[in-house]
Image (cartoon, rainbow, N blue to C red):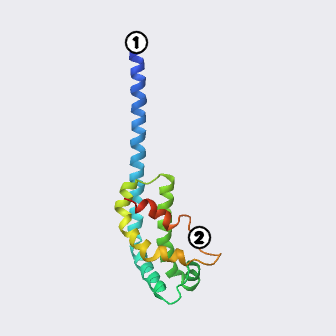
Amino acid sequence: MEFVTGLVGVLIGAFLSAFFTRQESKRQTRINTTLKMYERFQSILSSRLIADQLLEKNLASPHPLTYTELKRALSPENWQHISRTRSLYNELGLLYRAGYLDVKLAKLLFAPIFKYWYDSHLLKMEANQKDPETVQWIVAPDEIATWLLKD
């Protein structure tokens, strides 16, 4: 009987050890993914600054262009800055959907700058979309804001 009790204890211990090791591994993977995403975010700083200027100028005009119109109107060199920045936010949203981000860390790293972009550009540009052939993003800024800007 003591042997069976000991065996059950060993099995339960092994199961719990494997379970908690797997949980910690998943947590560490989410942290690493979030940090890598932040490194990419920082690596496109110059593109974000140029995109900020381009969108600010567009939205200040009497008749702001949509994403699709901007894509056609701007040179590929200029459009890439807007596309790169918006695509990065899109990827952030996709990683969140898939459960690959450490949300607490992502909020610390991305929320302040995303809030600026959301209020200054993204919300206005998304609302400005009117043609059926629009540049499509998989994750809308509103969806990102629901989790990233939530307390």
> Which residue is the site of mark 1?
3
Residue at the image point whose x is 59% and y is 70% from the top: 136
Number of other residues with Cα within 10 Å of mark 2, as a class: few under 14, some 14 to 19, many 20 or more: few
Q: Disc 2 vs disc 1: Cβ atoms closer than 8 Å?
A: no
Residue 106 image-quadrant placement: bottom left
Mark closer to the chain start, 2 or 1:
1
Where 58 sits versus 99, above or below? Answer: below
Closest to the camera, between mark 2 and mark 1, is 2
The location of residue 148, given as percent across then percent down, is 42, 61
| Quadrant where the N terminus is found in the figure | top left
User: Disc 1 on helix, strand or loop?
Assistant: helix
Residue at the image point whose x is 39% and y is 26% from the top: 13
| Quadrant where the C terminus is found in the figure | bottom left
> Which residue is the site of mark 2?
136
Residue placed most toward the observer, 116 or 44 = 116
Label 2 is placed on what type of residue? Gln
Residue at the image point whose x is 47% and y is 84% from the top: 59
The location of residue 16, given as percent across then percent down, is 40, 31
**Apparent side of residue 108 relative to residue 56 in the rendered image (left or right):** left
In this view, the residue farthest toward the bottom is 62
